[in-house]
Every structure is written in structure tokens, then in C-alpha cells.
Image (cartoon, grey):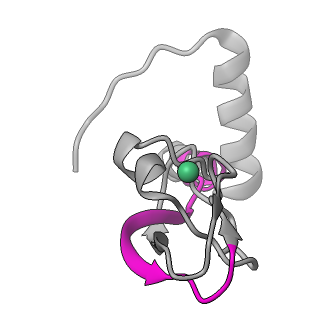
Amino acid sequence: MQRLNFTFDASTAELLETLANTYYGGNKSQTVRAALESLAAHTRHMGWVIAGYTTVVLDRPEACHTCGGRHRKGELVYRPVFERGSGAAALEALPRQPWFECPRCVEAGSVTHA
Ligand SMILES: [Zn+2]
């Protein structure tokens, strides 16, 4: 346990009081905790991030996801490997389309997540 001191303006103090009395039996500590958890859930952007790449030899022509460059069958490109993670660029869901990156985009770190 850690004791923290906050200074709230009147309306924030009133809001805390109301929420605590309405939902948490007057317990302000529990109320602040619930508020922080709610904030974390909304701002964390938990999703999928690129953890690394595997090499792929194309068995048909494909375009680079980032620069759009065309690549022929037999060319070596990179496919992202996703892991659970957070960040502004995290994807909400795994991509449903094949995703290839050319060596230039991977090396330059310019891969876009959109
Ligand atoms: Zn590219």
C-alpha cells in the first residue's frame, strides 16, 4: 500500500464523491482504481504488433504492403510475424489479406501498419 496525496478542483472532488457513494459504498480509493482501469482499457490499444519477419519466396506475383512495389514469382520478400502488444500502431485484428514487405521497406523501418 502506498499513500498518495492529490489535489482536486471542486468539481472533480464532487464527481469522485458522487461516484464513490453511488457505486463503491463511499470508498474513494476503489473508485479511483476503477477509473484508472477504465482509462487504461481505453487508451492501451492492446492489439497486434509486428514482432519480426520471416522470409518467403513468392509463388506468385505480389505487391509490397508498404511501398506497393511489384515483386515477381521466385523473389524473396518478408512476411511479418505478429504478437500481442500495445502501442499507437497496434492492429485491432490480425490482417485478413496476405502481407508481404520488400527488403527495402523492412530495412528502412518504414513498414506501415495501416
Ligand atoms: Zn516495399
Name the residue at 49% across, 62% down: 49
Q: Position of residue 20 (x, y in %)?
A: 66, 46
Q: Return the residue found at the far bottom.
A: 59
Side of 59 where 50 appears, left or right: left
Q: Is residue 45 magenta?
A: yes
Side of 105 where 100 appears, left or right: right
Image: magenta residue range: 36-61
From the viewer's perspective, is residue 14 above or below residue 19? above
Nearest the viewer among 40 and 88 is: 88
Q: Position of residue 68 (x, y in %)?
A: 69, 51
Nearest the viewer among 7 and 76 is: 76
Name the residue at 55% across, 15% down: 8
* Residue 44 appears in the rendering: no
Q: Is residue 34 magenta?
A: no
Side of 24 where 51 appears, left or right: left
Q: Position of residue 19 (x, y in %)?
A: 72, 43
From the viewer's perspective, is residue 13 above or below residue 1? above
Name the residue at 60% across, 89% down: 59
Name the residue at 67% across, 21% down: 12
Q: Return the residue found at the far top.
A: 9
Q: Position of residue 21 (x, y in %)?
A: 71, 47
* Residue 113 appears in the rendering: yes
From the viewer's perspective, is residue 15 above or below residue 58? above
Q: How many discs appear? A: 0
Nearest the viewer among 53 and 73 is: 73
